[in-house]
Image (cartoon, rainbow, N blue to C red):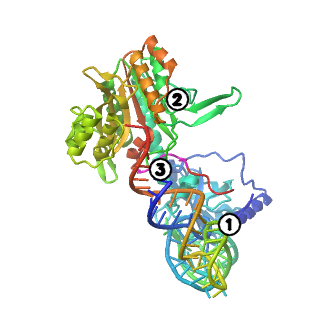
Amino acid sequence: MELNDLQQTRYGKLQALQAAGIDPYPARVPQRTHTLTALREQFDALAEAGTSVTIMGRLRQRRVMGKSAFAHLNDDHGAFQVFLSKADVGDEPFKHFVDLTDLGDIIAVTGTLFTTKMGEPSVHVTSWTMLSKAITPPPDKREGQFSDQEARQRQRYVDLAANPEVRETFRIRARLITAMRQYLDQRGFLEVETPVLQAIYGGAAARPFTTHHNQLHQDLYMRIATELYLKRLIVGGFDGVYEIGKNFRNEGVDRTHNPEFTMLEVYQAYGDYESIMELTEGMIRFAAEQIFNSTSIEYQGQQIELGGSWQRITMRDAIFNKTGVDIRECREFDTLWEAIREAGLKIERKPTWAKQVDELFSEFVEPELIQPTFITEYPQPLSPLAKRKADDPQFVERFELFMLGAEIANAFSELNDPFDQEQRFLEQGRDYAAGDDEAMQMDEDFLEALRVGMPPTGGLGIGIDRLCLLFTNQTTIREVIFFPHLRKQGEE
RNA sequence: GGGCCGGUAGCUCAGUGGUAGAGCAUCGGACUUUUAAUCCGCUGGUCGUGGGUUCGAUCCCCACCCGGCUCACCA
C-alpha cells in the first residue's frame, strides 16, 4: 500500500496505538447508549439525572487546549460536542487522545452531560475508545468543502461523510421508494422479481447490453424493461404485480440518463390507461404527503403542485395548441409535413408520420410541461405494446406523465390481442432491418402467453431516478444515484 | 460525436514564459469552557498525460485522458 505523507503520519499514530496495547480496529466495542440525535432530544433529563452515556461517531472537529480538549462527533443524523480534561479522563488517555487521534477517526466516548459556558450541550468524557483509525484525512473540516463533482462521484463515501445534505438526498430517495411500495401493497399489488439476464430483450425501444453465459455457451441481454415478464404474470392470474428494479440501456449519459437506472413497473388486471392515471396521481401524491406533509413541492425556485387532478391533454390538442398543426387531420407524412411548412415551424424532417409527430411534441410541447401533465393518445407506431383506440386505431390508449419538462412515467392499456401484437412485432422487425437498432425483437413466447389469454390490463412504468429529482430538488440524475456511471480513470 | 469550459498541495482555490501561492488540514510549540478556537513557527507540488516551440514551459502550440455545460443521439 502506497501511503502519502499525511497517511504516513496517521499510520505512525496507528503503530503508536498498537505499541500502547490499543487495537486501532477493535472487534469488541462499548455498548452505544444513544445516537447523537437521541442524546440531543433527551439532553435535559439525562443531564439532570447525571446519567452516564456512551456515544460513538466520526471525529469531525478537534480543539485541543493544553490540559483540556473539545471535539465534535458526527453520526448518521447528528453531531454532538464532547469535552475532555486531563484531570478527569486521566493523563495517559488524555495524551493518547491528543497525540494519536485525527479528524476522521471513529471513536466512542463515555461520560455525563453538561452545558458549557457558551451554552453548548456536551459530554464530559470519563473515558474514550478508538473504534476505527482513519488513514486518509477527511477533505476539510468545514462542511460542503468537498465539492468537486468528479471527486464526489468517484468517492461517494467521502462525499457522504463530508456533506450531510447528500445523505439527506439519498434518505429521501429511500423514503420515496418506500412510500410507493406502501401505496401499491395497500392496494393488493404483489411485488415480484423477474429476470435481468434475458435471451430476448423487449418492452422498450432501446439498445441492450450483451453478456455471455460461459457454461451454457449462450449470449444473453441485460434487460431494458420488465414489461413482458410482468405481463406474463398477469396472464398467470395475478390481479396486480409490480417490480422495482434496475434496467440497463446502452445509450449516452447525461443529466437525465444513466446506463443503469431504476424503474417501477406496475400492471393492473382489469384496468386501463385511465385507471392507471388515477393510480399514478394517487401514488406520487401519497409519497409527497408521506415525505413532506404537503402536495406542493418547491423545485428550483418554482412550486410543483401535486394536489388535485392533474391536467390531461391529448397529444393532438397539446401539439395543436402550440403549433396550430392538427395531427388528427394530417394523418400521413406528406400532409403533416405540408402543414408544418405552412405553419412555418423550424423542425427536423423525420422519416415517418409517427416520428414526425413525436418530433413536433418533443420540440414544441415537452419543454413547457413543468407542472404534472398527462399527455394522452399516442400514435400507434410509437407504441408497439399498447392497445389501439376503438374509435381511432391510428392512435393508442397511452399516456405519458411529464413534469419539470421531462418524461416521468409511461403507461398504456396493454395490448392483449395476440394477432395484433404479432403484427406489431413484425413491424418492429422491419424497422430493425431498416436500420432502427432500438426496435423490438419478436418474442414468440410472449405471443404464446397472450394466446393463453391476458385480461384487459393497465400498465405503468415510472423512472424512479427522475421522479427523485423532483423530491430532492436536484437537477441531475447523478445526484440521486449513489455510484453513477463514470469512465475509468487513467492507470492505477 | 460537435462546440465551449475546466484539471495547480489532502480539500477549496489564486497565479506567472524565468526555481510555485493562500485558507483549511498536517507537523512542532503555548494554552483547562472551545465551537470555522486562538497565538507562534515549519512542512507539504511529476501544476491531468505525452509530445513540440523556447536558452528556459505549470503558462504558448498539438495530441490524448478525465470531468462539466451544451447541441446531436436517446425515453
Q: Residue A201 shows which numbered tag? A: 2
Q: Position of residue B64 (x, y in %)?
A: 60, 60
Give me the C-alpha separation between circle 3 and circle 2: 29 Å
Alpha-carbon span between mark 1 and mark 3: 30 Å
Q: Which residue corresponds to the image point at 48% horizontal and 31% vertical from the top-left?
A: A433
* Magenta stretch holds residue A411: no
Q: Is residue A32 left or right of residue A187?
A: right
The answer to whether residue A340 is above or below residue A331 is: below
Locate residue A239: give its quadrant: top left
Q: Earlier in the sequence, mark 2 or mark 1?
A: 1
The residue located at (56%, 37%) in the rendering is A209
Q: Residues within 10 Å of mark 1 (few under 14, many from 20)?
A: few
Q: Amino acid at mark 2?
A: Tyr
Instruction: Please state which of the two labelled residues, at mark 3 or mark 2, is closer to the viewer.
Output: 2
Is A441 situated above or below A346? Answer: above
Which residue is at the far top? A452
The residue at which mark 3 appears reads as A479
Please state, as top left, top right, bottom left or bottom right, where the C terminus of chain A lies in the image: bottom right
| Bounds of the magenta segment | A474-485
Say which amino acid is labelled 3.
Glu
Classify residue A345 as left or right of residue A142.
Answer: left
